[in-house]
C-alpha cells in the first residue's frame, strides 16, 4: 500500500511538471520574441551636454583704494553695560543689567514663551511659563524672560506682565510693556 502511494505521488508530480512546461513554453517563446524585437529597435540619441557661459572674473581691489573693508561692521556695537543715561537708559536699568547673571528664559524670544498657569506658595505668587522645548519654568516678580531684558513686574492668576528694554533706530533705549497671558479655552 505504501509503495502504491509513493508511485501515485511520483506520477502526479510528473504530470504537474509536464503541464507547467507546456504552460510556460508558449510564454517563453513570446518573451523571447518580444526581447529580440526591442533589441532591434533603433536607439535614441543622447542629448549633448549644454554649454556653460563663462563668467566674468572680478578681482576685489577696494582694499588698495582705501575703501571700507566689507567684513568690518559699519556701525559700532556698544555693550549694554557701557550705555548711560544719554542713550535713554535709566540708572536703575543700567545697575540691573550690569550686576546680574542671565536667566534661563532669556534664551528665548518672548513670543515663543507661553503662560501655563500660576501657583501660590509660601505667600508668593509664582507664574508657570512653558518654553519652546516644552519645559515648564517657575518665575516670580523680579525674574527675567525674553531676549530684550524683560523683567517680570507683576504676576496675576491669568497674566505675567514684563517691562522690556528695547533699542530704537537712533540707538536710544526705551522701556516697553509686554505680557504673557494664559490661553483662553
Image (tube, rainbow, N blue to C red):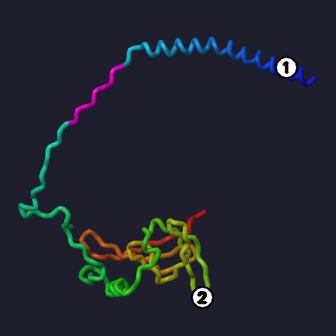
Q: Residues within 10 Å of mark 2 (few under 14, many from 20)?
A: few
At x 56% / y 80%, what residue is drawn? 126
- Between circles 2 and 1, the one closer to the viewer is 1
In the image as oriented, which residue stretches furthest toward the left?
65
Residue 170: quarter of image: bottom left
**Can you give x and y, in whole percent of width and height, for residue 167 in the image?**
30, 73
Q: In terms of depth relative to the viewer, which is nearer, 158 or 126? A: 126
Which labelled disc corresponds to residue 70? none
Above or below, 50 relative to 5: below
Principal secondary structure, stretch drawn in magenta: loop
Above or below, 83 relative to 114: below
Q: Which residue is mark 1?
A: 7
- In which quadrant will I find the N terminus? top right
Q: Which residue is mark 2?
A: 123
Q: In terms of depth relative to the viewer, which is nearer, 148 or 52? A: 52
At x 31% / y 25%, what residue is drawn? 47
Amino acid at each position: 500500500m505504501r509503495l502504491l502511494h509513493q508511485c501515485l505521488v511520483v506520477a502526479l508530480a510528473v504530470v504537474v511538471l509536464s503541464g507547467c512546461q507546456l504552460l510556460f513554453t508558449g510564454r517563453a517563446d513570446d518573451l523571447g520574441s518580444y526581447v529580440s524585437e526591442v533589441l532591434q529597435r533603433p536607439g535614441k540619441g543622447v542629448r549633448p551636454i549644454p554649454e556653460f557661459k563663462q563668467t566674468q572674473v572680478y578681482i576685489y581691489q577696494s582694499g588698495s583704494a582705501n575703501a571700507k573693508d566689507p567684513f568690518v561692521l559699519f556701525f559700532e556695537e556698544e555693550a549694554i553695560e557701557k550705555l548711560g543715561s544719554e542713550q535713554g537708559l535709566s540708572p536703575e536699568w543700567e545697575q540691573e543689567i550690569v550686576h546680574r547673571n542671565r536667566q534661563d528664559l532669556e534664551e528665548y524670544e518672548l513670543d515663543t514663551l507661553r503662560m501655563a498657569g500660576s501657583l501660590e506658595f509660601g505667600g508668593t505668587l509664582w507664574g508657570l511659563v512653558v518654553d519652546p522645548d516644552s519645559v515648564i519654568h517657575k518665575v516670580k516678580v523680579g525674574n527675567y524672560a525674553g531676549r530684550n531684558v524683560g523683567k517680570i513686574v507683576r504676576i496675576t492668576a491669568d497674566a505675567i506682565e514684563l517691562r522690556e528694554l528695547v533699542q530704537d533706530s537712533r540707538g536710544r533705549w526705551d522701556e516697553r510693556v509686554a505680557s504673557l497671558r494664559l490661553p483662553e479655552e
